Every structure is written in structure tokens, then in C-alpha cells.
């Protein structure tokens, strides 16, 4: 259970009472939500809702003993549609987030980018001219496809509005375009397996786990988009800002150094050497 995220969410729920300011991110809320929303329908209903309230109540009692347990239902009720008692939707509880984080929440739920290779597929598809950035037109095309998954019809005007908000929040250098590192903030991958891995020493079991994660087609080697995903995860772990040119250059360097048989693919033994070396990045 994501206890840290649950505590942070509860702190935000208690903010009106405690006066304590807590910054809650879209990732914090999704970590909580995905744990309770067992059927992934975007609503906590019946047993899901009861579990949500019960566990938050237990945390309230143990972590925040100065607040009465009876406060919790009132705080939760503030986020519930009065016509639909004993259930709560993620859109309703998203009021805990600021404008930028609410926007991130919507896109991360709709996009469902699960891994770095998923991200790279999206990037390569919509960077149609291959210049390493998404201009406004490419961004709008991207949004049209992304939001086509939504059950609510999205107009062209809404697409333009979303594009403007994305550039407002994530175009760090204000050039009216999105670089790959800026896009990563909009659609961060949920499973950067290297982010929580200690690379100083890698056991055989851990190496197997990492290799199997990137070897998506189970071919026995990491290649093409699989390797691009690995390179992206390494860069994301090492630096905040980079462009597609740096990603491609880093990919070439890694292949040159660690692809011992020069077949353009990374075997398990080559991956171990690569990861051990990358700890010094």
C-alpha cells in the first residue's frame, strides 16, 4: 500500500482544519487512487469506497492523533457528488490539486503511458519532421489522438485550449515548442525501473528482472525501441534536461562501448557491464 502517498493525501484533506500547507502532486493522488480503484473505472464504489475511508481513518488515528476520526467523513463528503453517496470519482477528489497538477492528472489518466518504450513510440510518431521537438501543430495532432480515448467528445477548440495550457506549463524555455525532456514532464513514464534500483551492486536476480523488463518481445536481446527506452530511463535518472540529439548520441556511445559483438543489440551480460558503468554518470 502506498502509505506515504496516503499520508500526504490525508494531510491535504486536513489542510483546512490544520492550516498546514501541503503540496500534493498528480503522481501522489494517482498512487493512492490506483491502489483503491481495483476495477480501474475511475470511481471508488461500494467496497472500494469503504476500504478507502477505513484505511484513511486508520492513518488519521495513528499518524494524526490530534484530529478526531469523525473529521474524515466530513472532509471526504466535501469532495463527493451529493446525488451519488458512498462513492467518489477521481475528477471529484482532484480538487485537492492545483491547476497544473489537475491538468497533469487528466493527461496521465488518458494517455496510459506505462513505460519508456511506450513514451518513445509516442514521441517518434508525433515528431513527424524528426527535428527533436514538437511544434504547436504536431502537439495538436498528438492531443487529438490522445483525447480520442476520452468518453467525452473533445472539440477542436478544446484541443487548442489544451495545447496552450501545455505550452504554458511545460515549455520551460518559452520557444512555443516541446523538447523531449519537457514532454517527459507532461507524460512521465510510470515504470522507470532504474529510478529505484541501486546500480552499485547488481545481483543476478535483479539483473534478470531489469533485463526481462526491457526485453519486451522476449527475444533474448534488448534492441530498437527497447534499447531507446533503456537509454531514456538512464538519462532521466542522470539529468533533467536533454534533447533528442543528446539521447541519440548517448545511445550510439553506449552501443559503441558495450555492444561487444557489434550486432546493434544488448545481451544480458552486456547490460550488466553497461549498468555497472552507468553508476558513475
Image (cartoon, helix red, strand yellow):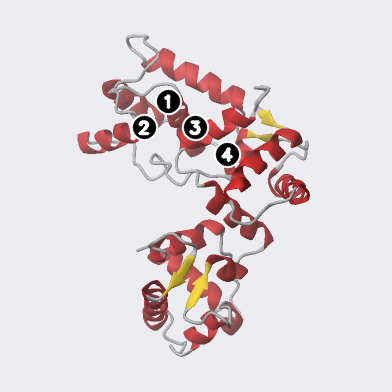
In the displayed structure, 255 sits above or below 147; it is above
Judging by the rendered image, the residue that carries numbered circle 1 is 227
Bin the neighbour count of mark 1 within 10 Å (Cα to Cα): few under 14, some 14-19, many 20 and up: many
- In front: 223, or 85? 85
- In front: 262, or 121? 121
Observer-side mark, 2 or 4, equals 2
Which residue is located at x 56 percent, y 64 percent?
A: 24
Bin the neighbour count of mark 4 within 10 Å (Cα to Cα): few under 14, some 14-19, many 20 and up: few
SS assignment at label 2? helix
In the displayed structure, 214 sits above or below 9; it is above
Bin the neighbour count of mark 2 within 10 Å (Cα to Cα): few under 14, some 14-19, many 20 and up: many
Is residue 17 toward the left or the right of residue 280 in the image?
A: right
Judging by the rendered image, the residue that carries numbered circle 3 is 232
Sequence-wise, the earlier of marks 2 and 3 is: 2
Judging by the rendered image, the residue that carries numbered circle 2 is 214
- Quadrant in which residue 34 is drawn: bottom left
Residue 192 in the image: state x and y as whole percent.
43, 41
Sequence-wise, the earlier of marks 3 and 1 is: 1
Amino acid at each position: 500500500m502506498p502509505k506515504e502517498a496516503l499520508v500526504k493525501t490525508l494531510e491535504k484533506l486536513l489542510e483546512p482544519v490544520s492550516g498546514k500547507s501541503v503540496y500534493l502532486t498528480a503522481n501522489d493522488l494517482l498512487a493512492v487512487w490506483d491502489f483503491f480503484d481495483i476495477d480501474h473505472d475511475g470511481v471508488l464504489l461500494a467496497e472500494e469506497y469503504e476500504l478507502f475511508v477505513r484505511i484513511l481513518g486508520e492513518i488519521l488515528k495513528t499518524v494524526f492523533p490530534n484530529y478526531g476520526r469523525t473529521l474524515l467523513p466530513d472532509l471526504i463528503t466535501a469532495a463527493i457528488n451529493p446525488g451519488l453517496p458512498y462513492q467518489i470519482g477521481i475528477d471529484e477528489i482532484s480538487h485537492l490539486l492545483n491547476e497544473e497538477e489537475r491538468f497533469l492528472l487528466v493527461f496521465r489518466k488518458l494517455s496510459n503511458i506505462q513505460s519508456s518504450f511506450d513514451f518513445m513510440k509516442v514521441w517518434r510518431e508525433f515528431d513527424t519532421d524528426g527535428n527533436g521537438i514538437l511544434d504547436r501543430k504536431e502537439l495538436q495532432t498528438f492531443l487529438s489522438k490522445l483525447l480520442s480515448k476520452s468518453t467525452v467528445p473533445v472539440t477542436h477548440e478544446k484541443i487548442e485550449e489544451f495545447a496552450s495550457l501545455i505550452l504554458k506549463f511545460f515549455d520551460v524555455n518559452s520557444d512555443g515548442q516541446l523538447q523531449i525532456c519537457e514532454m517527459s514532464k507532461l507524460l512521465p513514464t510510470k515504470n522507470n525501473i532504474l529510478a529505484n534500483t541501486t546500480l552499485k551492486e547488481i545481483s543476478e536476480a535483479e539483473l534478470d528482472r531489469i533485463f526481462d523488463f526491457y526485453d519486451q518481445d522476449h527475444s533474448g536481446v534488448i534492441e530498437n525501441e527497447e534499447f531507446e527506452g533503456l537509454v531514456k530511463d538512464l538519462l532521466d535518472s542522470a539529468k533533467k534536461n536533454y534533447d533528442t540529439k543528446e539521447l541519440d548520441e548517448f545511445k550510439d556511445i553506449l552501443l559503441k562501448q558495450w555492444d561487444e559483438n557489434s550486432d546493434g543489440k544488448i545481451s544480458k551480460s552486456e547490460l550488466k557491464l553497461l549498468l555497472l558503468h552507468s553508476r558513475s554518470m
